Amino acid sequence: MESSSHLSLTRRALVAAAAATAGATTPEGADAQPASAGNSSTDAGTPAMTSVSLRVNGELRSLELDTRTTLLDALREHLQLTGSKKGCDHGQCGACTVMVDGRRVYSCLTLAVMHEGDEVTTIEGLGQPETLHPMQAAFVKHDGYQCGYCTPGQICASVAMLEEIKAGVPSHVTADLMASPQLTAEEIRERMSGNICRCGAYSNIVEAITEVAGRQA
Amino acid sequence: MRPFTYERARTPAEAAAAAARNPGAKFIAGGTNLLDLMKLQIEVPSHLIDVNGLGLDRIEATPEGGLRIGALVRNTDLATDERVRRDYGVLSRALLAGATGQLRNKATTAGNLLQRTRCPYFYDTNMACNKRQPGSGCSAIGGITRHHAVIGASEACIATHPSDMAVAMRALDAVVETVRPDGTARQIPMAEFHRLPGETPHIETALERGEFIAAVTLPPPLGGQQFYRKVRDRASYAFALVSVAAVVQRDGTGRVALGGVAHKPWRVEAAEGELTRGAKPAMAAILGGARPTHENAFKLTLAERALASVLADAKG
């Protein structure tokens, strides 16, 4: 237990350091720009605090938060649920994907305070090391990752995505809008385009999802 | 992100009144574009009015035979609605061509209309941008313009509107229903909802301060074959270089609106008579007066070929 928490802390520190380095060397854009501007935020007013209660992985959690806190930061920094990852923090990479009331969303692009009473499911709620969710087991079996950073988001997104297909939600590649969407590799790829894997494990991810979908059908 | 206070509005009128009371306020629904811009301090509201609790999340049949889409209907739900898939395929297709599953689950009908341009010079706060900082100039002009407008632009701004949904709604002659801060309602045709940049590119819509979108109404179904052909740099999750929303009838007549070419969904009704003569004359009429740069002149050819492909598919 002790060694595993030590390991996770080391891993987090490493990731944080890597992110900071990336920010310092990025010439323009998201990471580099707000660091200095952020310090002047008190000019525009003092932080406003709000209380919010949400159900996270079946447990009611009440928090007192700065209104600016995203759902992702609430999960990671306030509830210590660090399975959901911060990749781009701009809704472009999918690493922060969680389910809110059963639907997949980017937790970095929504405020925690907007989720009063909502049911949030993170990767920790889907499965645990000793009780893996079938999708987690399939990702292990098919080697659906390399570094693993995008994996919690990939798994949350894929579990919710299969529910969307079941519910008849069409996609860009669905040929007939009036027919039930089919579970083809093309459909899976299109529907998972909101989750980037920098290691390029896509083909194995498609295999993992296909296996779970086949088992469900 | 700058600090802001937060409230949940219970009725559209209350939301509009709260916005009128707070000059620095913004409505927030899905938040997928607004929060992105707030993180970059391009949007710096001092107060957020959460409108998610207003109950405007239904799609209802209208007495005229059309559909009334609540402002808060999520993009996924609108694209999936059986009536939309059956009778307004161009709208369903346009929605599905945009963003990702996660974003469509959050993004709302009204928010989609109000999203800001993805012009990289608007996003880069070190660059001059008349939209972000009126009067500061336009760094896009003379810059890298591959993605920019080819028609209807001005000396002040050459940004495009990023929405796919709005292009389909323009083709369908949708009407935006709003509530003003004094409680009065009005209807704004899609043709007049988004503005060309002119001298004031920071004013993007016909909405007044505090005016709140309650719904978007679709006229009765047009029938015909409906298409949304989007051409982009990636197969998925990318904004349009050019997109064509089209409704084509059996006799070859129809309607066409374009995305990716202007500051608003681009439709020229007077040019649609040319559709029966083919893509070339039709697109020449639709994009007559275009002033592309050497980097985005390809959009004219691309639009014509995208329309040709749609017309070929319509013939079957």
Image (spheres, rainbow, N blue to C red):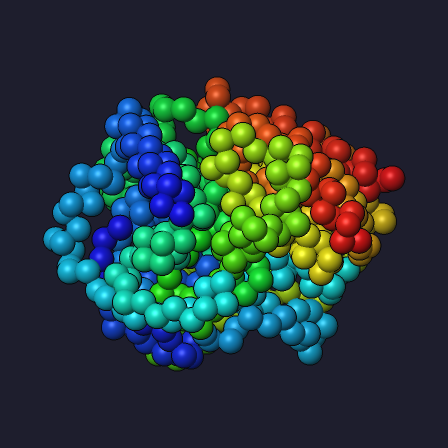
Q: Residue at x 74, y 64 (%)?
A: B82
Q: Image height check: is B8 above or below A142?
A: below
All told, the count of numbered labels is 0
Q: Residue at x 61, y 35 (%)?
A: A144
Q: Image height check: is B71 above or below A85?
A: below
Left or right: B24 as drawn, with respect to B29: left
Residue at the far left in the pictured view:
A43
Q: Residue B146: tell me if it is visible.
A: yes
Q: Residue at x 36, y 58 (%)?
A: A79
Q: Residue at x 69, y 69 (%)?
A: B66
Q: Residue B263: tell me if it is visible.
A: no
Q: Position of residue B227 (x, y in %)?
A: 72, 46
The answer to which quarter of the image holds residue A187 is top right
Q: In front: B258, or A41?
A: A41
Q: Position of residue A170 (x, y in %)?
A: 71, 52
Q: In front: B215, or B126?
A: B126
Q: In front: A84, or B298?
A: A84
Q: In front: A73, or B260?
A: A73
Q: Position of residue B182 (x, y in %)?
A: 35, 78
Left or right: A76 as drawn, with respect to B83: left
Q: Position of residue A168 (x, y in %)?
A: 73, 58
